Image (cartoon, helix red, strand yellow):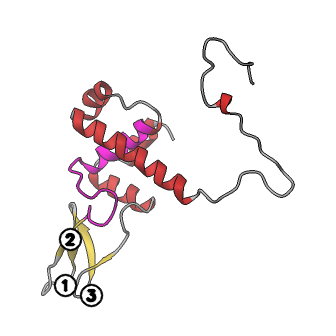
Amino acid sequence: MNFTELLTIVSNSDTGISFLQQHNIIKVSEVCENGHIMFIKGSRWRCQKRSCRKEKGLRINNWLTGSRLPIHTIVHFIYYWAREMSSVTFCKRELNMGQNAVVDWSNYLREVCVWKLEINQNKEIGGPGLFVEIDESLFVRRKNNAGRILP
């Protein structure tokens, strides 16, 4: 997906919410404390029952908890971050984000990646009868032209 396609899908907070629901970041449905079905109105869950009218924030109990950025800005930032285009000056100019928000979200997305890798830590690469050797030289730069050149 390129950014133009993302813009057509996520152009405002409402479309951003449905995009995040499709990717299991925001729940598709919610139930109030009285057991009634809730619906999304604006940026909150609201109970459908007139006698109840309970409300919950959309950003509660998911990884958007505590964020104040518009939903579509968050989706756009995640896209740029994944494309390694999340410098502070770029995000200030293109997404109207403050410096602290850019740094916090970059760190947070890095933590999400680490968490996901730790969950999948026990998975082995290769397979039955296959041995995989990983050479550290492929992950770090050679210093002072020492060592051999690897493909």
The total of numbered circles placed on residues is: 3
Q: Quadrant of residue 143?
A: top right
Identify the secondary structure beneath mark 3.
loop
Alpha carbon separation for disc pair 3 and 2? 13 Å
Q: What label sits on residue 49 in the rendered view?
A: 1
Identify the secondary structure beneath mark 1.
loop
Alpha carbon separation for disc pair 1 and 2? 14 Å
* Residue 149 lies in the magenta-colored region: no
Which residue appears farthest toward the right when viewing the image? Answer: 129
Q: Which residue is mark 3?
A: 35
Q: Earlier in the sequence, mark 3 or mark 1?
A: 3
Magenta segment range? 58-81
**Residue shown at 29%/43% (left/top)?**
73
Q: Is 11 placed left or right of 126 in the picture?
A: left
**Residue shown at 39%/62% (left/top)?**
21
Q: Earlier in the sequence, mark 3 or mark 2?
A: 3
**Residue shown at 76%/41% (left/top)?**
133
Above or below for 111 versus 18: above
Q: Which residue is mark 2?
A: 56
Q: What label sits on residue 93 in the rendered view?
A: none
* Dot 3 and dot 1 residues touching (CB under 8 Å): no
Q: Position of residue 1 (x, y in %)?
A: 51, 41
* Dot 1 and dot 2 residues touching (CB under 8 Å): no
* Dot 3 and dot 2 residues touching (CB under 8 Å): no
